[in-house]
Image (spheres, rainbow, N blue to C red):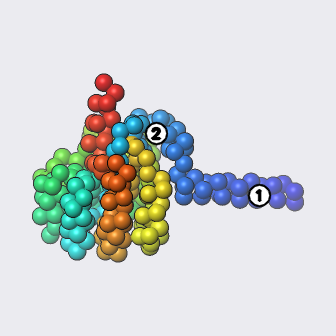
Amino acid sequence: MLRRWLAGSLLGLFLVFSGAILMLQPRWVLKQLNGASDKVLYSVETELPLVALTIDDGPDPATTPRILDTLGQYHANATFFILAEHVAGNESLLERMIAEGHEIGNHMITDQPSIRLSESDFEQRLLTARQTLTPYAEPYWFRPGSGWYSRNMLAILSRYGYHTVLGSIYPWDAHLPSSRFASSYILRRVYPGGVIILHDVQERGIRTINTLETILPELQARGYHIVTLTELTQAAAESLK
């Protein structure tokens, strides 16, 4: 009976601790994760006033143009992680992203957990998505669906020259339908070298528009420049020379 109680208590504590880590995303944990593998990027160590903005799941004909308008208004750049199934009919949006200084990344074909795919299926879908995106720009950044990855996935991605990225400032906007919460979360946790994660498409895209309208002027008032992942990593590397 006592063993069962202790086991239940330890499990409960573990779940509470894990939940706190996921929600708060403390920098010391993310720093450890960042150093644990040179194949997955969470954030960049730098004192430069730069933060990378990433937006998943687009393009969407209703919301992506408004997101691009808002980014343009504040001279902010972003890395858009594209779902290949959303490209057909929205080709002009990808062209506009590239023309306006943004970049695109590979987020597979559909919005599903990449880790659940077999190795062969993962590789095939990765290459199919890449083939869809390459006419607009060669995608070097990859973000796994639902954020989970395996060693075998990383080996496949490395074979094709991809840099895998998750992020360090995720306001749970895909789960919590509150732009106010997302904006407050980002502004409380932003720091130089951080990587922000937001989402596009339908209601998520509308929330992202509202969030950007709140955070971009405030971040700029604090002296931050909002950049792509490539701009962030290159600037950080140059500053170390």
User: In front here: 235 or 221?
Assistant: 221
Between disc 1 and disc 2, whose residue precedes? 1
The residue where tag 1 is placed is 9
Label 2, secondary structure: give it: helix
Quadrant (top left/top right/bottom left/bottom right) for the C terminus: top left
User: In front here: 49 or 238?
Assistant: 49
Label 1, secondary structure: give it: helix
Q: Is residue 150 above or below residue 35?
A: below
Residue at horizontal 48 percent and vertical 56 percent from the top: 188
Task: Estimate how packed mark 1 is, as few (under 14), some (14 to 19) or many (20 or more) residues with alpha carbons within 10 Å.
Answer: few
Give the x, y percent position of residue 1.
Answer: 87, 60
Amino acid residing under circle 1: Ser
Label ID, residue 30: none
Residue at horizontal 35 percent and vertical 75 percent from the top: 203
Q: Is residue 144 above or below residue 182?
A: above
Give the x, y percent position of residue 121.
Answer: 33, 54
The residue where tag 2 is placed is 34
Identify the image quadrant of residue 13.
bottom right
